[in-house]
Image (cartoon, grey):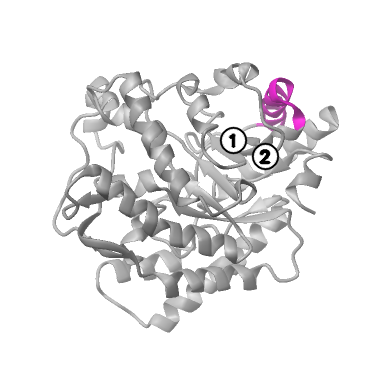
């Protein structure tokens, strides 16, 4: 059953894509990152097994639209240095930003070791080119194999957006920011189109679109919107050959558990999001800084095919949301944009880097997903 037909019968469920990986796979991944190698065949098998188990886990929980859990990737943007020619991992220590709107507002909190911002881990030293065809082919094959015998509404694969790659890679080659942006757009287009050609939807992971305002202390809202509009244009150029029905867009405010008082308000983003040539828009809503924002969508006329994927459970707390609360959140959105325009999702991904202890333990992720599925069932009873 397709999304188009299924959404007329009930509230569908999905998530942002990144899911906890097995500890054994994390250990192998860290060893490779540190240059300690290991048998490639052992790592490849570990990834295949992790993808198979991750797909089975999502399906058994009752999620409708699932992913490969990004099991093969070291992070939602860190993976790009393995797939882009002209890009290399940066050596030495590179601290994150010393000043952001959030760090400047709560210096003691962040000085105590709480996560703030991650530094760009790669640099561009030559012409960009997509060289990760074999890695991507393996990802696509692993997911296809894991899906055999399963009947799901849809399957997606996340990929770093143009703006995300721009923020993750320090430009040491292109003469201007505009040249760099155009090169990223053309290069990442290869990955996006290959994912869709394999029969999956592509999700553009784009937290920078919402976070750029917070990351730059001197930037005004209007300056942030101007910056974001240009990235939307570049993003649309990169997906120009893909039907909107096969594109999801995700933006958020990061994975750290912080005060979040300087998040760009959704009222400054809604018009920009709807310019993206995608039919599905994923964003934070279960976060207490943003739960009040459901009502701004009442003034937005939703095109017939498009759906909102508001987060109904969050990564920003280990508290497990009650299914009744999840249902209430779904119904609020359905009341303002229509039930067929809402798919229940999560605020963000749940997998930290393979080096760290996940901020939300896998057992809690499962409990949150169970609440998400049950909440969608309750909301469906009320709405259909």
Q: Which residue shows up at 30% across the image and 19% down it?
A: 220
Q: Name the side, left or right, on which 269 lies relative to 208.
A: right
Q: Residue 94, relative to residue 318: is it above or below? A: below
- Dots 1 and 2: beta carbons under 8 Å? yes
* SS class, disc 1: strand
Where residue 333 sits, quadrant-wise, is top right
Residue 143 pos. (x, y %): 59, 67
Out of 41 and 277, give the one closest to the viewer: 277
Residue 181 pos. (x, y %): 31, 47
Q: Is residue 207 visible?
A: no
User: Magenta region: which residues?
Assistant: 322-339
Q: Which residue shows up at 64% across the image and 44% down it?
A: 369
Out of 226 and 318, give the one closest to the viewer: 226
Out of 169 and 253, give the one closest to the viewer: 169
Where residue 274 sits, quadrant-wise, is top right
User: Residue 372's mark?
Assistant: 2
Question: Which of the marked residues, 1 or 2, is nearer the chain's N terminus?
Answer: 1
Q: Is residue 296 visible?
A: yes
Quarter in which the N terminus is drawn: bottom right
Give the crowd class for mark 1: few <14, some 14-19, many >=20 residues within 10 Å: many
Was residue 67 drawn as part of the magenta stretch in this picture?
no
Q: Name the side, left or right, on which 176 lies relative to 365.
A: left
User: Residue 233's mark?
Assistant: none
Give the crowd class for mark 2: few <14, some 14-19, many >=20 residues within 10 Å: many
Out of 136 and 286, give the one closest to the viewer: 136
Is most of the magenta stretch helix, strand or loop? helix
Q: Name the side, left or right, on which 300 lies relative to 184.
A: right
User: Residue 313's mark?
Assistant: 1
Q: Residue 95, relative to residue 296: is it above or below? A: below
């Amino acid at each position: 059953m397709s999304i188009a037909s299924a959404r007329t019968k009930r509230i569908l469920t999905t998530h942002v894509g990144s899911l906890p990986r097995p500890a054994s796979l994390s250990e192998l991944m860290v060893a490779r990152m540190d240059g300690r190698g290991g048998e490639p065949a052992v790592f490849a098998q570990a990834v295949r097994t992790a993808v198979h188990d991750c797909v089975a886990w999502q399906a058994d929980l009752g999620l409708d639209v699932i992913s490969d859990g990004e099991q093969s990737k070291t992070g939602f943007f860190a993976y790009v240095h393995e797939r882009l020619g002209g890009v290399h991992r940066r050596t030495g220590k590179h601290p994150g930003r010393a000043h952001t709107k959030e760090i400047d507002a709560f210096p003691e909190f962040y000085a105590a070791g709480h996560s703030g911002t991650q530094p760009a881990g790669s640099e561009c030293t030559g012409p960009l080119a997509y060289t990760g065809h074999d890695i991507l082919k393996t990802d696509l094959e692993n997911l296809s194999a894991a899906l055999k015998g399963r009947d799901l509404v849809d399957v997606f694969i996340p990929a770093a957006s143009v703006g995300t790659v721009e923020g993750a890679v320090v430009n040491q080659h292109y003469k201007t920011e505009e040249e760099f942006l155009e090169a990223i757009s053309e290069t990442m287009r290869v990955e996006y189109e290959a994912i869709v050609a394999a029969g999956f939807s592509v999700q553009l992971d784009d937290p920078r679109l919402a976070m750029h305002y917070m990351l730059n202390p001197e930037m005004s809202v209007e300056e942030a919107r101007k910056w974001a509009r240009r990235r939307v244009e570049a993003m649309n150029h990169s997906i120009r050959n893909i039907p909107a029905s096969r594109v999801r867009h995700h933006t958020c405010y990061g994975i750290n558990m912080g005060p979040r008082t300087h998040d760009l308000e959704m009222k400054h983003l809604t018009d920009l999001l709807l310019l993206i040539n995608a039919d599905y828009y994923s964003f934070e809503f279960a976060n207490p800084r943003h739960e009040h924002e459901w009502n701004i969508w009442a003034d937005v006329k939703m095109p017939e095919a498009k759906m909102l994927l508001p987060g109904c459970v969050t990564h920003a707390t280990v508290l497990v949301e009650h299914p009744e609360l999840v249902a209430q959140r779904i119904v609020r959105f359905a009341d303002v944009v229509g039930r067929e325009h809402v798919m229940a999702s999560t605020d963000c991904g749940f997998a930290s880097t393979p080096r760290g202890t996940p901020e939300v333990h896998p057992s809690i992720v499962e409990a949150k997903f169970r609440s998400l599925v049950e909440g969608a069932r309750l909301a469906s009873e009320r709405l259909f």
